[in-house]
Image (cartoon, coloured by chain):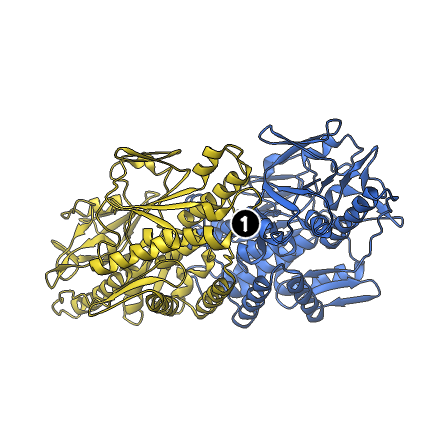
Chain colours: A blue, B yellow
Amino acid sequence: MVILGGGFGGLAAARALGRASVRITLLDRRNHHVFQPLLYQVATAGLSPAEIASPIRRILRRQRNTQVLLAEAAGVDLPARRVVLADGSRLAYDTLIVATGVTHSYFGRDEWAVHAPGLKTLDDALDIRRRVLLAYEQAEREEDADRRRQWMTFVVVGGGPTGVEMAGALAEIARHSLAGDFRRIDPRSARVILVEAGPRVLPSYPSTLSVKAALQLERLGVQVWTGAPVTALDEAGVQLGPDRLASRTVIWAAGVQAPSLGRTLGAPLDRAGRVRVEPDLTLPGHPEVYVIGDLAVLEADGRPVPGVAPAAMQMGRHAAVNVLRALRGEERLPFRYVDKGSLATIGRSAGVADFGRVRLSGFVAWAAWLGIHIFFLIGFRNRFVVMFTWMWAYLTFQRSARLILGSSGGARE
Amino acid sequence: MVILGGGFGGLAAARALGRASVRITLLDRRNHHVFQPLLYQVATAGLSPAEIASPIRRILRRQRNTQVLLAEAAGVDLPARRVVLADGSRLAYDTLIVATGVTHSYFGRDEWAVHAPGLKTLDDALDIRRRVLLAYEQAEREEDADRRRQWMTFVVVGGGPTGVEMAGALAEIARHSLAGDFRRIDPRSARVILVEAGPRVLPSYPSTLSVKAALQLERLGVQVWTGAPVTALDEAGVQLGPDRLASRTVIWAAGVQAPSLGRTLGAPLDRAGRVRVEPDLTLPGHPEVYVIGDLAVLEADGRPVPGVAPAAMQMGRHAAVNVLRALRGEERLPFRYVDKGSLATIGRSAGVADFGRVRLSGFVAWAAWLGIHIFFLIGFRNRFVVMFTWMWAYLTFQRSARLILGSSGGARE
C-alpha cells in the first residue's frame, strides 16, 4: 500500500500499520516531518528548523515493513491504481491513503504570494524570518522617516491561530528581543497589525475567548483590525477597502486551498478544493482509497471535523483500522472525532484554551500550550532542546535563531 | 572609524575598542558572525546554523560606541577616505580596519563552483547538507547499479583541515547515522574519497601527524588519494589526470582567493590576491588603514602568519592597540604572532593536535578539540546546546539536523 504525505495524518496511519503484514511505501516531497504548530516559532527566530522537524526515515526506521521515498505525487490514476509522480513515473498500489494536507489560499490572487508569504513549510518559515530581520536592518540604514516607518510596520493577514501566534511573536521581538541592538531606530516603536476580514479573531473559538485574545494582543502592542478584508496588496503595503497600510513586510495567514492532486481523485470537492469523503474516510466509489487530514472534508456526529493536527492523527489511525478490517473481510467503521480542545498562544506567557467546559486564558493557557506542545514534539532530544531554548528565551528575552540566510544574503533594495 | 567584516578579526578589533572614545561602524554583508571551524558540522547535519552563529548586533549590543550595519562593501576610495558600498553609497572613515576574509579558489576554473560547492558561509553549509542528504535519497530511488554507485560516491577536494574534517564526518554519516534508515541501499557501502594534489594531507602540520591523520581517516572508511590534482570537474564526477571518479557529490575545500575589494587597496598582493601589509598591520603608505585576518599577508618573526582564526583574533586586538597608540601620538608596534598550536578532528573521537613540543592524536586530540571549540563558541546558550547535541550524537550516533531545505525542495533529477 501507498501513503501520500508524511504529516500528522500520514505518519499516524503508517505507525498504526507498523506491525501489520502489509508492505507500505510512504511518499513525501520533503525528507522531514514538521511539527507545524510551532512553525511560527521558526518564522520568528525563536527555534531552529531542526528543533521542530525530524527526517521521516528516522521516525520510521524501526518499522521494517515501511519504505520512505522522497518524491512528489502529481496525481492519482484511479482506474489503473497508480500514483503519478511529478517526474512522470508511476507507483502501483492496492490500497492508497492520501494525506497531502492543504496550503493557504490567496483567494484567486496568487500574484500576492510573492509579497505576502504564507506559513506552511520550513522554507516558508525561513523566508519569513529573513524578511522580518531584514526589515529592521533596512530601517536602521534608512534616512527617510516615512520609509523607515514602512520598514517598521508588520502586517499579519488572517486572525486564525497562526495569525494570532505570529502577531504576538512579532510584537515580542520588537518590544524585547531586538530592543537595544540598534542605534538609529528603536525596535519598540515598530507596529504589528493583525488584520482579519471577519468580525473577530480566532473565529473557531468561543467568542469570550476571542475577546480575551484580542485584549492580550493589544496588551502586547499588537493592533487588531477586524472587519478589514484585504482588497489589494503590493510590495509597499496592503489596501483594506478604502484604507491603505504602508508596510514592507506582510505575512499571509488566511485561507485554505487543496493541492491540485485532489482534483485527480474524481470526488466532489468543496470550495477550497478539499475532498468530500465517506464516513469511513474512503473516496466515494473507491473503497481502496482513503483521504485523511486537512485534505478531507466530512462531518462526524453532525459537525464538520476541523483541519487541526489532532483530527489528522485520529483520521490516520482510523484509516489504518479500516485498512486492516477490510483485509480481514470486516466492515469498515465510520470515523468519530474526539475533540480534545483547542489552544492558541499569544506571545510570551499569554494564550487562550478551549477544552469544552473548561476555558482558560492568560498564563495558565500558555503553560498548558507549552506542556502539550513539548510533549508531542517528536524525539526526546528535540523535546529537551526546545524546552531549554524556551526556558532560556523566557529568562533572557533572547531569540536564538536570528540569522538572515539564503537568497540575497545581504541587504539590497 | 569603520571596520569591514564581522568575522574573528573584525569582531576582535571592535571588542578591543569597546571602551575607547571612538565611534565605530562595523559593516558586514551578513547579519551574523559564524564560528567557522564548525561550519563542516552544519554541512554534515550535526549542528544547526543557529548553534554556531550569533547576530553581530547581539554580540556588540552593550558596546554603545559601536553601530552595526548590514551592507556589502565593494571597495575603498583611499584618497577620499571612503568605503564604497555595493549599492553605490559611500561611508566616510578616519581610520579603517579591513577584515573581510578570503574565499576558496577554483584556480581560475570558477565554472566548477556550481558542481563543487565550497564551505565558507552558512548558506554554503546548508547547500552541501542538502546535496549530501539528497544523494542518498536519489540512490534509494535509483534502479541502475552504476548510477546508484555514482550517487553514493562523495568526493572531497583538498586535504587541509576543512577537507579532512569534512571527509571524516561524511564517512561517519554513511557508517553510522544513516545505517538502517534505508531499505534498498546500504549507506555503509557509500564511498568517501579525499583527494589532495600534494603528497600528504594536513600539509601545514608536522608530517608524523599527517601520517596519523591519514591512518585515522582510512580506519573511518575514507579513501585518501594524495598526489591527485583535479584537472576537470562536471556534474558527473572529477577527472584526476588520467583517472576518472564518477560522483554526483563533490565538495571543494581547496585554495584561497581574496575578494575583489583587496584590489582597490592599491597595495602589493600575493598570488591569491591577499594584501601585503606593514609589520604594524597597516597598508603601505596609508597608516590610517589596517588589513587583518586571512586577507592580510605578513611575516612575523621570519615566518608567515597562517590564515587561522587565532591569528585573525590576535591581529584584530593588535590593530586596536595600534589605533589607540596612533590616537595618543605614540608609535605603532609591529605584530607578533603567538602560535598556540593547531587541532583537527577526524570524525567521532579521532583527531590530531600540534602544540609545538606536544603532539597528540586519536581520542585525546579529539577531546582537546571539543573542549577548545565549545569554550570559544560565542554565548552560553550555544555552548550548552552544542555540548548537549554532541553528547547526544556521541551516544546515539544520530545527527539531528538532517533536513533537506531550500531550492528544489523535492527530489528532481
Compared with B333, B160 (above or below) is above
Count of numbered circles on the image: 1
What's the residue at 17%, 44% (across, down)? B271
Image quarter in which the N terminus of chain A is found: top right
Q: Position of residue B83 (x, y in %)?
A: 27, 50
Relative placement, left or right, of A46 versus B244 is right
What's the residue at 53%, 70% (across, down)? A392
What's the residue at 22%, 60% (across, down)? B208
Task: Name the residue nearer the viewer: B51 or A202.
Answer: B51
Whether residue A102 appears in this view of the structure is no
Task: Name the residue nearer the viewer: A385 or B19.
Answer: A385
Task: Name the residue nearer the viewer: A206 or B254.
Answer: B254
State which chain disc 1 sits on: A
Image quarter in which the C terminus of chain A is found: top left
Task: Determine the secondary structure under disc 1.
Answer: helix
Relative placement, left or right, of A332 versus A275 is right
Quarter assignment of residue B387: bottom left
Disc 1 designates what residue?
Answer: A128
Task: Name the residue nearer the viewer: B151 or B1.
Answer: B151
Quarter assignment of residue A294: top right
Q: Position of residue A243 (x, y in %)?
A: 64, 45
Q: Position of residue B66 (x, y in %)?
A: 34, 64
Relative placement, left or right, of A131 versus A219 is left
Whether residue A59 appears in this view of the structure is yes
